[in-house]
Each structure stands twice: as structure tokens, then as C-alpha cells.
Image (cartoon, rainbow, N blue to C red):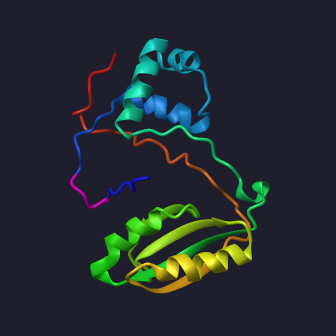
Amino acid sequence: MTAVVRSPFDPPRESPVDEIDLGIIAQLQYDGRKPYTQIAEELGVTEATVRRRVNEMIRAGILQVVGIVEPFQLGIQAPAIIGVSVQPALLNQAAEQIAEFDEVSYLLMTSGGFDLLVEVMCRDMDDLARFISERLGQVPGVQRTETFLILHTYKLSYRWGAPQRMPSAGRPSE
């Protein structure tokens, strides 16, 4: 698995999406299994257009359609967010190594008190303790960690909303 490295500080790309793509994204954010025929009808395009554009956005890395699970319902008893301080010269190397751990579901470089925030899903407290000491603690450059146990999830959403206006460089509408 290769980590996707993209920063909000990277120069903006020419927008590879237009209003139709944004409409497709918005529909799939609310129901990733929504039939393409319904999406097409709501957007006023053909089902073939929706299918082609979804496939193009998936290939381009713009869109992922995945199943989201509730960890507690699967018996995950020790989900946690771990703040990690890393020696600056080893930050990218450490992040790449941490991203490869199966327990890691989300990894971010941040500003503030920690260099990285790592979301992990561990079966129980023993697994979490082993992960911190035997895996995370052995990554070159890791100086300090602070673990925050997730006790209850009040909201879990990937419905970020598509931007209302995109640069005019997007492809023409169909």
C-alpha cells in the first residue's frame, strides 16, 4: 500500500472536475451504492456518462467508493488517536513506515503539538499497548507519543461537500 502524499500547501492543480462530476460526487457521498441511473436522472445526463465519469475519477484518484464500518460493532475495543512527535529530518520516512501498519486507518501530518496524528484500530488494550511499544515506538525518528482512546463516536462522516465553485479550467459539461 502506498501512502498518498498531498498537502494543502501544494500548488493548486488545474481542476479535473466540472459541475457534473461534483454532482456525481455529492450523490455518492450520501449513498455510495446509489444506482447510476438515478444519479443520471437527477443530474440530467445519461447513465453511461455517470459510469464513465465515475470510472475516470476513480482512475485519477479523485474518488473512492468504499464501505465504512463502525469499529465498535466489529468488536474493536481499543480504537485510538495517537499524537506522534518525530525528528524533523525523519518525518517523511517515519510517516511512510507508520502508514504501512495494518492497525493504522488514518494518518495526518499536522501543525501544533504533534507532527503526526495516527488513528488506529486495535482489538483490545493489550493489542494497543503492543502496537505503541513494539511497532510505533520502534519507528526511527519517533520521539514521543500521546494516546487518546476513542470512547464514543458522535459523528463519522465523509460527506465533506464538494466545493461550490471550481476553477473554469474544468472540462466542458455534457
Vertical relation: 148 (above or below) 35: below
* Magenta region includes residue 9: yes
Is 124 or 149 nearer to us in this picture? 124
Vertical relation: 95 (above or below) 13: below
Q: How far across and down, in percent of the image, does residue 71 sit?
A: 71, 57
Is residue 45 something that shows in the picture? no
Residue at image x 55%, y 33%?
A: 28
Q: How far across and down, in percent of the image, does residue 27 sit?
A: 54, 31
Q: How far across and down, in percent of the image, does residue 36 sit?
A: 54, 20
Quarter of the image where one finds residue 132: bottom right
- Left or right of 86 on screen, residue 36: right
Residue at image x 61%, y 26%?
A: 34
Is 6 or 17 nearer to us in this picture? 6
What is the tally of numbered marks visible in this picture?
0
Quarter of the image where one finds residue 140: bottom left
Vertical relation: 66 (above or below) 107: above
Residue at image x 49%, y 44%?
A: 161
Looking at the rendering, in which quadrant would you find the C terminus? top left
Q: How far across and down, in percent of the image, does residue 152 sit?
A: 73, 66
In magenta, the rendered stretch is: 7-11
- Left or right of 79 on screen, residue 13: left
Q: Main secondary structure of the magenta part?
A: loop
* Magenta region includes residue 114: no
- Left or right of 160 on screen, residue 88: left
Quarter of the image where one finds residue 76: bottom right
